[in-house]
Image (cartoon, rainbow, N blue to C red):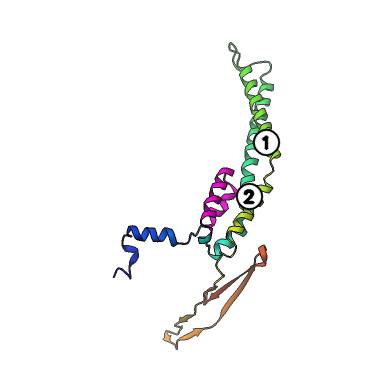
Amino acid sequence: MKSTFQEYYSLSDDDFKSIWSECLFVLDTNVLLRLFRYRQNTVDYVFEVLEHFKDRLWIPHQVGWEFQRNRDTKIDEGRGVYDGIIDKLTSVENYLTSTLSSLKDFGIHPAIGLDEKLIELQMHVSGSREYIETQYEEKPLEQHYENVFNKVSELYQGRVAHLIIMTSYVIYLKLVNNDMMTKHLQASLTLRVKHMNLANIYMVIFCYGDRR
């Protein structure tokens, strides 16, 4: 019985040693896509580990396709975080400037001079925004993204499964006027082809049955 239901039995130490020394490492699409968002030191470490096991790397065709299709979205996601931070800092800066202007003749507190702290905060926010913008612009990310993409492509060269299309037929019973009719084998089939812009890949979807 154990040979039939292996998943219900604990593995021995020898089993674990065999697995770690012979198994294939199959990463999910999200693991590969997150390399576009991780810090450089994390990216370098992940690639170092993958390089060590490069002879045992493998991914399904679907994972490779999703990586190609979604990498630009993941890159834009990172850029969106930066844009959002700059927008928030600019908004706070503008608010402080407007508030200081409106309090010019009145102050925040009649007996305590709090205006200086507000001015200090405004200058700090403004300085931080300018520093972040300068640092971001001085180190363009395009080359970093290109390096990540090329490294993943290199590691998985020849290690992507071929596209396999599985088909099935539906045998159904047709009821007409409450009488059971002869069994029919439905041969109608809808073929939809969705063009993939990347690498001229085509994805073929077979749909069988009454419902498309």
Element type at mark 2 = helix
Tell which tag, 1 or 2, sits nearer the viewer: 1
Report crowding for label 1: few under 14, some 14 to 19, many 20 or more residues within 10 A (C-alpha). few
Q: Most prominent secondary structure in the magenta stretch?
A: helix
User: Is 113 rendered above or below residue 65?
Assistant: above
Where are the magenta residues, as a range? 28-54
Is residue 105 magenta-colored? no
Q: Position of residue 95 (x, y in %)?
A: 65, 29
Going from N to C along the chain, the mark reached first, 1 or 2, is 2
Residue type at mark 1 is Gln
Residue farthest left in this picture? 1
The residue that label 2 is drawn on is 75
Which amino acid, by three-letter code, is at mark 2?
Ile
Is residue 37 rendered to the left or right of residue 12? right
Label number found at residue 135: 1
Residue 160 picture location, percent across and down = 56, 65
- Measure the alpha-carbon separation of dots 1 and 2: 18 Å
Query: Which residue corresponds to the image point at 63% horizontal and 71% vertical from the top-left?
Result: 193
